[in-house]
Amino acid sequence: MLVGSGSFAQHCSPAYDVSMVVSELSTDVQRLLAAIVAIAQAQHIRIFLVGGGVRDLLLGVDAGRDIDLAVEGDVSALTATLLTQLPLRLVAQHTSFGTATLITNGSPARLVIDLARTRVEHYPQPAVLPEISPAPLAEDLVRRDFSINALAIELFVDNEILHTGELIDPFGGVRDLAARQLRILHPQSFRDDPTRILRGLRLAARLDLQLVPTTAAVLSDALAAEYLGLLSVERIQNELCLMLGEPSPAAVVQRADTWRVSSALAPGLHWSPALAEAELRLQHALATGQITTSANLLFAGLLTYSLNAAARTAFLQHYRLPTEFSRLVVEIGALHELLPRIMAIKYESALEQSLRPFSDAALLVVHYAEQTPASDRIGHYVQKLRPLAPLLDGRDLQRLGVSPGPQLRRAARYAPRCTARWPCRNTRGG
Ligand code: CTP
């Protein structure tokens, strides 16, 4: 097993020891890698840690949940042996692309291993999937998106101990990482694969990177040529989902504004200080366990919050969103219309009736997006009142003989409340 530790600052020196970087992987990950590499070596296959995993290791970020391995050899044959000899399960395999995704059965728990045959790519047209052919690692790095992702470390095993080769960094990825710069590898990059624009946004926001001038110029040409518009809805949707999983989705939108990409994603989408503040409030509520609704859903609501009715409709028509997301966008629109009337609602029972149809997510988004008495009241309702759904409503009381009028309103307002969550109303059987 490798030993030692180190920080990125140390590794920026020209002669740093890459084995120190890999030693930062947990012991059980190193053990699994050693076993995989030993099997590859027995088949005379060279194997490399590659891409964002190397980048993250250099930054000292835990890359332990998803490991990309570039394989100079037959991925299908290697996969077949790995599956028979190691506690791994096959998740997906594309023989024509020479890729396989495996997941651990035991320790380390649920680690995903992506194997990919080293290859060159040829894009016959903009934004289509590439034609590929096997090639050595050096050519495989050339087909990648950014210098900071075109990094590799060869892995070896000797006496069951994992060893590393030199860091392979043909485009100055380490230099760019240290200088916080984002650089594409060739002028056709965004034309070949416009998703790289969106990948770049995420990386730039996450790692606080600036575009180098040459890449900024290529981006500007790519936007003018509208290459993003050539991508399928599914591919953009996939990137939007990844954006929601970033530490700060609002920071991604801020970059999208700076790069002039926002309107290509959704007309009307833009960053504002209010959005950043709302995101901070939401992050805090999630981190402290005040709310447990899906973070992705809430961030999606927050990012689309400022869209006007027309932009919202266009957004829903363009992206075939999963039901809960499209429902959220529709509900937020309806809540916008309701907001001006919220403070005029006198009784809690009436407030409950007005807000009952809305999901927790929509109400929480409005609460965290706005800071007005009306949104505070919505927050009070969803966080305090809704969990205490009324045991008896006006109709129940009428059934019990209370006649309609002020007396019924008062009784409904002060009716005892059950402490179960909201859906208990539907299971009372009445
Ligand atoms: N890659 C690429 N072009 C793409 C997608 C991926 O060049 N359109 C390459 C990059 O070298 C990238 C690697 O494939 O590092 C792995 O892709 P992925 O796992 O999607 O990216 P990561 O860099 O690991 O990003 P993240 O940290 O967001 O998981």
Image (cartoon, rainbow, N blue to C red):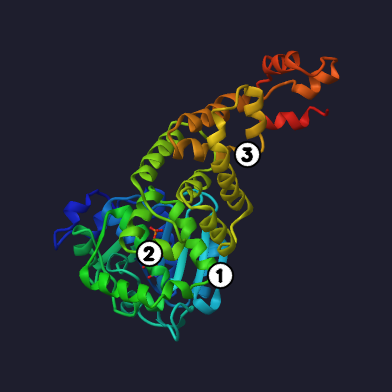
The residue pinned by badge 1 equals 93
Tell me which residue sits at (52%, 30%) in the image.
379
Q: Amino acid at mark 2?
A: Val
- Determine contact: label 3, label 2, CB under 8 Å: no
- Residue 148 numbered mark, or none: none
| Mark 2 Cα-neighbour bin, 10 Å: few <14, some 14–19, many ≥20 | many
Q: Quadrant of the C terminus?
A: top right
- Foreground disc of the pair 3, 1: 3
Q: As displayed, is residue 188 above or below residue 112?
A: below
Q: Secondary structure at mark 2?
A: loop
Q: Amino acid at mark 1?
A: Gln
Q: Which residue is mark 3?
A: 358
400 and 86: which is toward the camera: 400
Q: Would you name the residue on which mark 2 appears? A: 261
Mark nearer the N terminus (3 vs 1)? 1
Q: Which quadrant of the figure shows ligand 1?
A: bottom left
The answer to whether residue 229 is seen in the rendering is yes
Give the residue drawn at x 49%, y 76%.
Answer: 98
Q: CA distance from mark 1 to mark 2?
A: 33 Å
Left or right side of 82 for 415: right
Q: Quadrant of residue 134?
A: bottom left
* CA–CA distance in space, label 3 to label 1: 42 Å
Residue at 54% from the left image edge and 66% from the top image edge: 234
Q: Please provide percent x and percent y for residue 416.
A: 69, 15
Does the beta carbon at disc 1 come under 8 Å from ligand 1?
A: no
Q: Position of residue 113 (x, y in %)?
A: 47, 61
Q: Tag 3: residue type?
A: Phe
Left/right placement of residue 340 relative to residue 213 reads right
Drawn side of residue 227 relative to residue 110, left or right? left
Q: Residues within 10 Å of mark 1 (few under 14, many from 20)?
A: some
